[in-house]
């Protein structure tokens, strides 16, 4: 009885082997675009910063904003999208890069190896600390827990 089960299992495996080989052959020919994957990961990290950044000013060649009480800017330097001050590289090997603001959304448009890409990176309205104030007047002082 065990011999029959073993032979039946072996026949099933041998009949599935050509299907598995065909599947491996087709999947081996799929081109993996690692640049696009790394771009998406880097832009997701950039979106996390821009989500809590405030006072955003989008120009054609640079995006300026305040983050943690410091002034930062994103721009193209030597073919790389760099966050300054400092040098934090988000995109590399770029031919061209610019920012666009459309319908309240900021896009980063870049070209690499003749292929143009366009990604949303932030809301144009941004984040303003005054939005969280209880005061109706900018000169007034909030009185949440004050006596």
Image: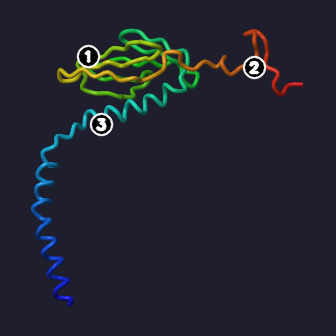
Residue drawn at x 41%, y 12% as measured from the top left: 102
Left or right of 100, for residue 57 = right
> Image quadrant for the C terminus?
top right
Name the residue: 83% across, 28% down. 145
Which SS class for mark 3?
helix
Q: Measured from the top left, where is residue 107 in percent x and y? A: 38, 18
Rendered residue at 23%/19% (across/down): 95
Note whether 7 is above or below 19 in the view shown. below
Q: Is residue 110 above or below residue 90?
A: above
Residue 37: which numbered mark, if any?
3
Dot 2 falls on a residue whose secondary structure is: loop
Residue depicted at 15% across the width and 54% down the height: 23
Residue 112, quarter of the rendered image: top left
Q: Position of residue 115 (x, y in %)?
A: 20, 22
Image mark for residue 96: 1
Q: Is residue 16 left or right of residue 111?
A: left
Give the residue number, with chain letter if any, for mark 2.
134
Whole-angstrom CA distance, mark 1 to mark 2, is: 44 Å
Query: Considering depth in this image, is 98 or 124 the residue closer to the camera?
Result: 124
Q: Residues within 10 Å of mark 3 (few under 14, many from 20)?
A: few
Foreground label between 1 and 2: 2
* Residue 10 at x, y percent in the picture: 14, 76
**Residue 55 x %, y %:** 55, 15
**Looking at this view, is 112 or 66 the one in front?**
112
Q: Residues within 10 Å of mark 1 (few under 14, many from 20)?
A: some
Q: Between disc 2 and disc 3, whose residue precedes?
A: 3
For label 1, the SS is strand
Image quadrant where one finds the N terminus: bottom left
Find residue 76 and report its image quarter.
top left
């Amino acid at each position: 009885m065990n011999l029959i089960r073993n032979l039946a299992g072996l026949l099933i495996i041998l009949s599935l082997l050509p299907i598995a080989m065909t599947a491996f052959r087709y999947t081996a020919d799929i081109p993996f675009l690692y640049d696009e994957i790394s771009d998406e990961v880097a832009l997701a990290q950039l979106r996390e910063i821009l989500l809590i950044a405030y006072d955003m000013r989008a120009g054609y060649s640079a995006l300026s904003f305040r983050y943690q009480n410091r002034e930062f800017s994103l721009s193209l330097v030597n073919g790389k999208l760099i966050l300054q001050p400092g040098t934090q590289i988000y995109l590399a090997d770029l031919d061209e890069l610019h920012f666009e603001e459309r319908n309240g959304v900021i896009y980063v448009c870049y070209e690499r190896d003749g292929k143009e890409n366009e990604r949303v990176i932030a809301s144009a309205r941004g984040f303003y600390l005054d939005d969280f104030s209880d005061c109706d007047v900018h000169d007034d002082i909030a009185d949440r827990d004050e006596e």
